[in-house]
């Protein structure tokens, strides 16, 4: 795998990166090179085409040369790992209480769960509760704030390209999420080695609009396509971009919300850093009128985003009650 990790991601190597390779792997799933887009190319039209096609066909792609400094990505990973290395009592200082934010441990012997996670809001400033941001390591806050600035810029760039791909003004998708009020949350997933490779993250689509994820080098992320699970290949310094439920609804189904899951590794620690980007909670979200018409009537109900969340979570609770194996098992 080493050679694959050190892929040359410069523009000149693009043709080989873009090739869609599908190979069976040991676990019975397939290793799939999901689309990889080099953002450092001057041909805007080409970029628009690549990210739009990937969103329509896969609902997931990786971006390289995306402008977020590699050193900053490394620092984000360092402070995240340092948090998990703290004594239990220090981690519990930012434990989850009634809401979704905070630190949570999920080790259920014999059960399906074998992970920990830390979740907190990043932006806009009005929704941040620093109570859930670790005080240790001391650089945690500064690094996360710097990362937020970069990840917002990159998200807006990708949303701009996707808007153009839909034939809309560049700002259209960003505005449909509430512009500066769109909500950014980070989740630091910690999957310790587990001999039976249990645990990880259950199959789900992301509830929000778009997710930008940095994994560590330990594989485990899989996506569902054509009735099969595929392994997502690790590319050093790349960012994995997922289309979530809201971009599927806003585009009237033109973009795919990708079903994905993550497995823990038998021997190595896996950590991932997804940033979930969601519409403002009180915003009406549904198919854009520009993307619907007599030939293409709306396929989704327009709902206040908060109500969409309640409805979806109620359905999950019912699935659990009746012990149904839901594919959408997880909240943030
Ligand atoms: O760990 C991963 O690669 C995926 C994480 C994920 O899907 C999630 O946190 O929602």
Image (cartoon, rainbow, N blue to C red):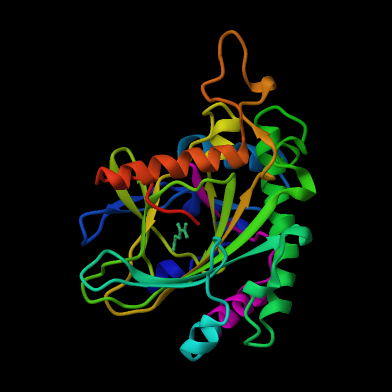
Q: Is residue 180 visible?
A: yes
* Quadrant in which the N terminus is drawn: bottom left
- The answer to whether residue 102 is above or below residue 65 is below
Instruction: Residue 70: give x, y in percent of width and height.
Output: 64, 73
Residue 76 is inside the magenta segment: yes
Nearer to me, 269 or 95: 95
Q: Is residue 41 visible?
A: no
Instruction: Residue 321: give x, y in percent of width and height.
Output: 29, 46
**Farthest front residue?**
98
Q: Answer with left or right where residue 125 lies relative to residue 276.
A: right
Residue 224 is inside the magenta segment: no
Instruction: Residue 29: give x, y in percent of width and height.
Output: 25, 54
Residue at (30%, 49%) from the top-left corner? Answer: 229
Q: Quadrant of residue 98?
A: bottom right
Residue at (55%, 38%) from the top-left corner? Answer: 308
**Farthest top residue?**
294
Residue at (68%, 65%) from the top-left corner? Answer: 68
Q: Quadrant of residue 165?
A: top right
Q: Quadrant of residue 80?
A: bottom right
Q: Answer with left or right where residue 220 lies relative to residue 53.
A: left
Instruction: Residue 83: give x, y in percent of width and height.
Output: 55, 83
Quadrant for ligand 1 reads: bottom left
Nearer to me, 118 or 277: 118
Magenta stretch in the rendered image: 59-82
């Amino acid at each position: 795998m080493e050679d694959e990790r050190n892929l040359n991601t410069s523009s000149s190597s693009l043709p080989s990166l873009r090739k869609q390779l599908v190979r069976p792997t040991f676990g019975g799933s397939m290793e799939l090179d999901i689309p990889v887009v080099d953002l450092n190319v001057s041909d805007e039209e080409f970029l628009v085409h690549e990210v739009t096609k990937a969103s329509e066909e896969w609902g997931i792609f990786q971006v390289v040369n995306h402008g977020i400094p590699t050193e900053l990505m490394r620092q984000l990973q360092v402070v995240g790992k340092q948090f998990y290395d703290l004594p239990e009592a220090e981690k519990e200082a930012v434990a989850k209480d009634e809401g979704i934010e905070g630190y949570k441990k999920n080790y259920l012997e014999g059960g399906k769960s074998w992970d920990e996670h830390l979740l907190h809001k990043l932006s806009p400033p009005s929704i941040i509760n620093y109570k859930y941001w670790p005080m240790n390591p001391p650089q945690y806050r500064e690094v996360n704030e710097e990362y937020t600035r970069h990840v917002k810029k990159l998200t807006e760039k990708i949303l701009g390209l996707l808007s153009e791909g839909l034939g809309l003004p560049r700002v259209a998708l960003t505005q449909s999420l509430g512009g500066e009020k769109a909500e950014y949350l980070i989740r630091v997933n910690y999957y310790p080695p587990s001999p039976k490779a249990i645990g990880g993250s259950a199959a789900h689509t992301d509830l929000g609009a778009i997710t930008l994820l940095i994994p560590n080098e330990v594989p485990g992320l899989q996506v569902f396509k054509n009735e099969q699970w595929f392994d997502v290949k690790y590319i050093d310094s790349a960012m994995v971009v997922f289309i979530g439920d809201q971009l599927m609804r806003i585009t009237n189904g033109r973009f795919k919300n990708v079903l994905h899951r993550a497995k823990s590794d038998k021997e190595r620690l896996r950590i991932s850093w997804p940033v979930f980007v969601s519409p403002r909670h009180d915003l009406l979200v549904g198919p854009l009128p520009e993307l619907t018409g007599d030939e293409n009537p709306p396929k989704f109900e327009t709902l206040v985003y908060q109500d969409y969340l309640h409805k979806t979570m109620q359905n999950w609770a019912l699935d659990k009650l009746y012990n149904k194996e839901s594919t959408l098992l997880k909240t943030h």
